[in-house]
Amino acid sequence: MNIPSDFIQDLPAREERLDFASATGIFTTISPDNLMLIGAAADRMRQARFGLRTTYVHNLQINPTNVCVRGCDFCGFAVLPGKAGGYSIPEHEIMATVAAANPSEVHIVGGLSHDWKFTRALALVKSLRQHFPALYIKSFTAVEMDWFAKTEKRPIEDILDAFTQAGLNAMPGGGAEMFSERIRAQHFRQKLSADDWLAVHEAAHRQGIPSNATMLYGMGETMAERITHLFRLRDLQDKTGGFVAFIPLAMQYGVNDSRELSPLENLHVVAMSRLLLDNVPHIKAYWPMIGIETAAALSFGADDLDGTLGLEKIAHASGAKTPERMAAEEMARVIRLAGFDPVERDGAYQAIDTRKCA
Ligand code: V47
């Protein structure tokens, strides 16, 4: 289908939403002209909502263990139980790291390990809440929540409720990968299915737990498969309204693999996400996987750069060439350089008055 350029230009102002057929027509071809049109439309949509405001958070990624019973072929971070290189961080070390870094938000995600099951994960959240009352705790993906439910033989609702009582604020969006049975069969056949990932998030939203969503791209999926993924998220969001942010994750091919997704493709995914996920407030440009230079992605529809991270391990275990952490001042500098207004935020996207913190 050949979509006229004025149709794309008018997208942000149109009443009716993009349907699957128009989305396929608009997004299937990535040419420089088409990319600039899509980017400009996505930028208008983002500016209508946020102006030039671009947020980042002083956060800490905590990966309590890399031991994982699933062998997803793209994940350089996970180590099978009993194999060399597996680790588990004792709780007192996690607490000490958080105390030293004093972040606004922690993002906790690890492997599916018999050493880190429900009771231990729950105790960690409780303890963090007790020691750091103001900390925003974004913890455990749908894949981990499902693992806790299965290993405990309890309904997912009970597990989510226990985490809420313990002090969890939100769930991260990891583990969605690509909602395609074809890609799943090739790369992550043992992992939670798309239906089950969506069901865990739906349950979380119904219990008042906000969450994020991701899409891992660059595994040989078709554009129609990417679009299907985004439509499935949009449909669930229409039902629940519980997604706060969407984060496209660019495949990192491994420490011994020099392949890298092109910046143009990364910008295309950011812009497409903003235009299709018209009901999800925040679109993040995730710098560890696409490079901080893609702060330029801020004019392609993204409004948030995630955070300082402390120590990013998942992308780097798979060969990411970006730094492992970023100073808040550097994030603000790059945002300003791209022509936007940097705002430090907390986990709930509220601006932090950094002058008061200084
Ligand atoms: O769940 C694993 C993915 C995710 C690779 O919710 C890979 O705010 C690329 O989910 N190449 C973890 N990706 C990261 C994540 C995330 C990041 C930032 C913010 C939020 C949020 C969530 O990374 C995993 C998996 O889907 N992943 N291996 C790889 N080789």
Image (tube, rainbow, N blue to C red):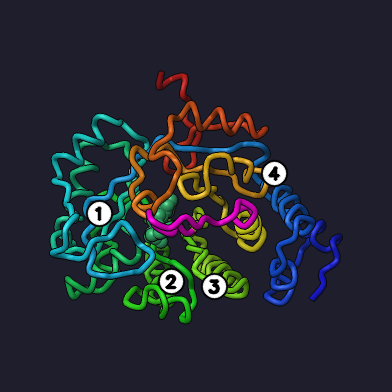
Q: Are marks 3 and 1 in contact (CB under 8 Å)?
A: no
Q: Are marks 3 and 2 in contact (CB under 8 Å)?
A: no
Seen at 62% across and 31% down, the residue is 341
Dot label at residue 268: none
Q: Main secondary structure of the magenta part?
A: loop
Instruction: Measure the alpha-carbon separation of dots 1 and 4.
Output: 37 Å
Closer to viewer: mark 4 or mark 3: 3
Instruction: Measure the alpha-carbon separation of dots 2 and 4.
Output: 29 Å
* First of labels 4, 3 by sequence position: 4
Kindly state the secondary structure of the residue where label 1 is placed.
Answer: helix
Magenta-colored stretch includes residue 258: yes
Q: Are marks 1 and 4 in contact (CB under 8 Å)?
A: no
Q: Residues within 10 Å of mark 2 (few under 14, many from 20)?
A: some
Residue type at mark 1 is Gln
Closer to viewer: mark 1 or mark 4: 4
**Residue carrying label 2:** 198
Q: Position of residue 37 (x, y in %)?
A: 78, 55
Instruction: Measure the alpha-carbon separation of dots 3 and 1.
Output: 39 Å
* First of labels 3, 2 by sequence position: 2
* First of labels 2, 4 by sequence position: 4
In the image, the segment drawn in magenta is: 251-267
* First of labels 1, 4 by sequence position: 4
Instruction: Measure the alpha-carbon separation of dots 1 and 2.
Output: 22 Å
Seen at 57% across and 32% down, the residue is 334
Instruction: Measure the alpha-carbon separation of dots 3 and 2.
Output: 19 Å
Figure quarter occupied by ligand 1: bottom left
Quarter assignment of residue 295: top right
Q: Position of residue 253 (x, y in %)?
A: 44, 59
Q: Position of residue 125 (x, y in %)?
A: 23, 49
